[in-house]
Amino acid sequence: MPFKKGTPKPLKSGRKKGTPNRITRTAKEAYAFAFDELGGAERLRDWAESTPENLREFYRIHSKLIPIDVTSGDKPIAPSAIRVELIAPSIEE
């Protein structure tokens, strides 16, 4: 039976909230495979440390991966403090 405009959707129809579609899941799996094949976290760290521009780009990308909606029940949780520590690389002779 085709959907008629103005008719509410049936209860519990469609995907459950938060379930990614197949293409999103497949793309994430392919990206994770390529990430591992290219050297994984160690290679990513080396790339980020190679230039100040790469380090800035690394943190820009990382900031997009941090969850925005952090809640406890129905009340939002605000962070009390965020500490960022930048350590200069040691120069070995």
Image (cartoon, rainbow, N blue to C red):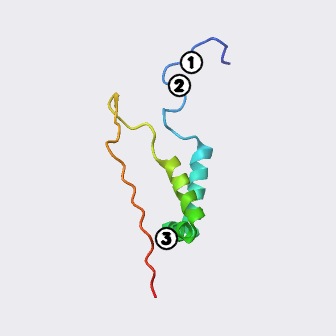
Which is more toward the observer, 32 or 5? Answer: 32
Secondary element type, mark 2: loop
Which is more toward the observer, 37 or 60? Answer: 60
Q: Residue furthest bottom?
A: 93
Q: Residues within 10 Å of mark 3 (few under 14, many from 20)?
A: few
Residue at image coords 51%, 56%: 59
In the displayed structure image, the side of residue 79 where residue 18 appears, left or right:
right
Nearer to us: label 3 or label 2: 3
Nearer to us: label 1 or label 3: 3
**What residue type is disc 3 on?**
Glu
Q: On residue 9, which mark appears?
A: 1
On the image, the x and y values in percent for residue 20 come to 54, 41
When the figure is inspected, residue 69 is found, relative to residue 65, above or below; the finding is above
For label 2, the residue is: 13
* The N terminus - image quarter: top right
**What residue type is disc 2 on?**
Ser
Q: Residues within 10 Å of mark 1 (few under 14, many from 20)?
A: few
Q: Is residue 31 visible?
A: yes
Q: Is residue 32 visible?
A: no
Q: CA distance from mark 3 to mark 2?
A: 43 Å
On the image, the x and y values in percent for residue 16 come to 49, 32
Which is more toward the observer, 50 or 35? Answer: 50
Residue at image coords 66%, 18%: 3
For label 3, the residue is: 42
On the image, the x and y values in percent for residue 82 come to 36, 49
Marks 1 and 3, the one that precedes in the sequence: 1
Q: Contact (CB < 8 A) between labels 1 and 3?
A: no
Residue at image coords 59%, 57%: 31
